[in-house]
Image: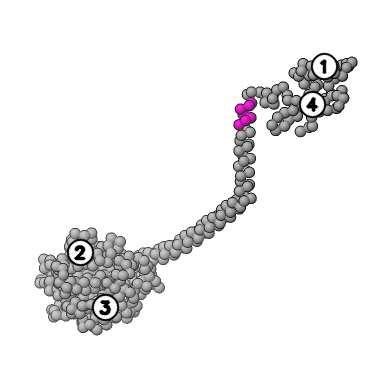
Amino acid sequence: MPSPQILPITQPPSSSPLTSRASDANSIMETSSTALDIMLLKEDDEQRTGVLVSPLFEDDKTIAYKPLLPRTSSYASSTSSSSSGSNTYKQKRRRVKSENFLSYLSGDGRHQTIDRDVENADADRAEKFLLTRFGLKLSKYIRVAFRWIARFLALGCYSLFLLPGFLQVGYYYFSSSQIRRSIPYGDKPRNKLDLYLPKHIDGPKPVVAFITGGAWIIGYKAWGCLLGQQLSERGIIVACIDYRNFPQGTMSDMIYDASQGISFLCNNIREFGGDPNRIYLMGQSAGAHIAACTLLEQAMKEVRKVESISWSVSQIKAYFGLSGGYNLLNLVDYFHSRGLYRSLFLSIMEGEQSLKRFSPELLILEEPNMGAAVSILPPIILFHGTADYSIPSDSSKTFADTLQSVGVKAETFFYEGKTHTDVFVQDPLRGGKDQMFEDLVAIIHADDAEALAKDAVAPPRRRLVPEFMLMLARSSIHCR
């Protein structure tokens, strides 16, 4: 801001100094409205002071005085309110900045800055951890999904190669008058069974109560159609029992359903031409495990006599286990490596604490007071292929050894080089002589000389699928 300019006061000559000074004061009062020539205003923070300087003063001193009008009067009244608001805002900003600056100097600002930096660093680390964890889980799910997709594709190829045979079996299932489909045996979902009847029923026929496999997830009564067709041609009634699969039910539900189906057969099979004194219980793969658990649980119920029973173990002539697993503690990790993941398998079996409960081999060895229950078990006959990669054949061997160690009559049939599906699917579709089937029929007809004579002259079964397609199907489903 430029320095104020001091202007001289012009005065006409006077004869006396005193007169001159009085005249000067009067002149100032008269000309105060035109202060361009007579005063200088100096601005201060609290008051304003005018300085009058005259070269005519003898003592060359200054005289201070208050201006006639305050500074605010030089502004228009219309701007007073906005000016005061602006000044207040600026003062508040200066006060806030001053307080922030003082708090920073006192250390609070530095502490807040450090805290913010620490919080930001923690947030970054947490975000990186979450992203890393999400990425690992996503990659795991991708691997799992890829393996399941690969297995479903393999199953699709397997079905495609065997499609000529499946079409013929399916036609028989839906068109044959010898099949009684979906007979209800209980009030739970899927409590139905299919009956395969011989063409000529000239007396009570032996009955096979069959529980299909399917990894406890995809089991269905129609999977036993091929076996039912074969056995019915040899004069044997087959009842394929359906049951709730996971997640519709867990292992307890599957055992309950199987027991209800067996009860229905024991009490009603006479109406369909079956012999209630010659009922055989059979299961394949997961169905063999379910059937064994059902049989052992029923034996324990009879010994304890704590529940009412609707069928008796004594009504079962023998148990046939085809490619089954009977010690789940030994199989849970193996199933995990084959794609039936541990978490899923434990969900089916109602938790890890239930594995022993649903392992017939372990129950026989470790369950107290099991001696009386195993003493009423029927003969146990186990069939297994030595090249079975789904459930190793050692499962049947160790189960038979355990049964024999406690006095149960147990027998094993092993088929060299046969896989999990060879003995149940490919060999029957191949036609000709099926060794496992012949062994099974021979045991059922062991006490029937007439039936054995008919079996000896029975014509070989015709082929349903070309050999090269069977080999392609085998390689697609059983690759490691």
Q: Dot 4 lies on which element?
A: strand
How far apart marks 2 and 1 lie (CA) works out to: 137 Å
Q: Which residue is mark 3?
A: 366
How packed mark 2 is, by other alpha carbons closer than 10 Å (few <14, some 14-19, many 20 or more), is many
**Mark positioned earlier in the residue sequence (1 or 4):** 1
Q: Which residue is mark 2?
A: 193
Residue 99, x across and y down, in percent: 61, 44
Q: Marks 1 and 3: in contact by CB < 8 Å?
A: no
Three-letter residue code for mark 4: Ile
Q: Which residues are magenta?
A: 79-85
**Mark positioned earlier in the residue sequence (2 or 1):** 1
Residue at image x 18%, y 78%? 372
How packed mark 3 is, by other alpha carbons closer than 10 Å (few <14, some 14-19, many 20 or more), is few
Three-letter residue code for mark 2: Leu
**Mark positioned earlier in the residue sequence (2 or 4):** 4
Quarter of the picture holding the N terminus: top right
How far apart marks 3 and 2 lie (CA) works out to: 34 Å
Q: Which residue is mark 1?
A: 23
Q: Marks 1 and 2: in contact by CB < 8 Å?
A: no
| Tally of numbered discs | 4
